[in-house]
Amino acid sequence: MSPDSPILTIHNVSKRFGGVQALQGVTLEIRTGETHAIVGENGAGKSTLMKLLAGVHRPDAGQMRYRGRPVEMPSPRAALKMGIGIVYQETTLCPNLSVAENLFLGNEPVRRWGWVDFDAVRKGALEALQAVGLEVSPDAVAGRLSVAQRHLVQIARALLENASVLIFDEPTASLSHAESETLFRLIEQLQRRKVTVLYISHRLEEVFRIADRITVLRDGKVVETFEARSTTPAQVVARMVGRDVPPAQVRPVARGRAPLLELHGLSGPGYHQVSLQVFPGEIVCLAGLVGSGRTELLRAIFGLDCFESGKMVFDGKELPPGRVRHRIALGIGLIPEDRRAQGLVPCLSIRDNLALPKIVAPGSPWLVDRAFHDQTAQALIRQMAIRAPDADFPAGQLSGGNQQKLVVSKWLPLKPRLLLVDEPTKGVDVSSKHELHVLLDGRASEGLAVLAVSSDLPEVLALSHRILVMRQGRIRGEIQGPEATERRVMELAAVQ
């Protein structure tokens, strides 16, 4: 098979889920040994296409060919045996097993008489973890790892499978800059080994860095395939959304009022002696590397975890540790880092998820007003452009970006005064990212205070009025105005 010959051919493939036509007549060729990026807005069909190739779903119509032969992918195990592996956007590890056990699950090396060779498992796990730059023990319980660490374990497991085709679905969504660089080096190694890489990402700077070709999907159809070296990000965005996306306009903040949130020497697991202020109407971003204590700090402010010392003041009144319900009543909301595990209930409908922060009717301590929730859900679906047939659609069947919109939307009817946002646009396309930035900035102009965590440096610079940089659990500096550059943020975040 020549280097430019297709290893995968998809011809006129379609897939429907209930009332949603996820893919419609998709035709695409993937060449042997290339890195081929699949881009598009949330709900465009990218993840559905990848799951068809990985054997998770089966097409309703059309044909797939692998190495020139018609094939069916009845299961992920069959696809993997054929040579097609996938790293999912949402982690799929078994939380109660160790890292090493997860890495070799279903493919354990065995001794004589079928006994698992645990020495080989541990040795192989150490090598795989070293390859992705993850410094955790192979014996660590997977469920106790951070989101970024779990994602790197998934990537390590995919590399162990030695597949001919590797699919990456938003692989850097939870990774720091340094971890992303490690991943790009791994992909370069795969290219030298003639491994075919299918790469889904909303971060176009990554796509243009590693991709040979770029295919744009919109509304479940192939719009166009570009040679990466002969096109520009602006051209790709225009084909993705069918319109120009203006840059977010961040307005200056005039501090004329007292701070809404104050932390004085707050300490707890993962953060130490943190002092900060957030004023009404401003967006403050916490920047830093994964593990710097940003997420732990947000959880303590919301009351999910208890701080050990220091003082927290909201609207002039001291807040004790814990007491989430009390914080919600005061007007504090949280958009968590792991939307699927902590931000929504996948088996419930869109309507029921939107009702989670306040189920009872306004003015009633116990009555559930279903008409009110239905009306609210319909309005938010339109306002946030959530792609779903109706409010009864299960939240777990939405695309990742539409799930993120849902997690944000559920707080809006409560008109919060302080919104804590952990990775606000994780797994969100260019257009939706712009919409969420405009939404947050618009609410801030009405007096909402926002304290956000983001690992996306361009987002940090575009979204924030002030940037607080954390390293090793402490705030190392504040940046605003002309000083706010990616280089300055990284100096504070990474330099001892």
Image (cartoon, grey):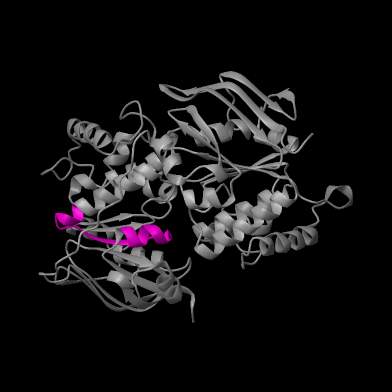
Percent coordinates x, y for residue 244 in the rendering: 33, 40
Residue 174 highlighted magenta (yes or no)? no
What span is colored magenta in the figure? Answer: 443-462
Query: Is residue 55 something one can see in this rendering?
Result: no
**Left or right relative to 217: residue 162:** right
Residue 166 drawn above or below residue 466 = above
Question: What number of labels is visible?
Answer: 0
Res 487 quadrant in image: bottom left
x 17%, y 67%: residue: 260
Q: Nearer the viewer, residue 465 or 146?
A: 465
Magenta stretch containing residue 445, yes or no?
yes
Q: Is residue 247 left or right of residue 214?
A: left
For the N terminus, which image quadrant?
top right
Is residue 231 visible in the rendered image? The answer is yes
Measuring from the top left, give residue 192's x and y in whole percent: 73, 51
Residue 141 in the image: state x and y as whole percent: 59, 60
Q: Residue furthest right?
A: 112
Q: Nearer the viewer, residue 396 or 167?
A: 167
The structure residue drawn at horizontal position 35% and vertical position 67%, both measured from the top left corner, is 286
Position of 249 compared to 427: left or right?
left
Q: Farthest residue to the front: give it.
A: 230
Q: Tell me residue 201's x, y (percent).
A: 50, 46
Can you say whether 204 is above or below 268 in the image?
A: above
Which is more toward the observer, 360 or 226? 226
Left or right of 449? Residue 77 is: right
Q: Residue furthest top?
A: 61
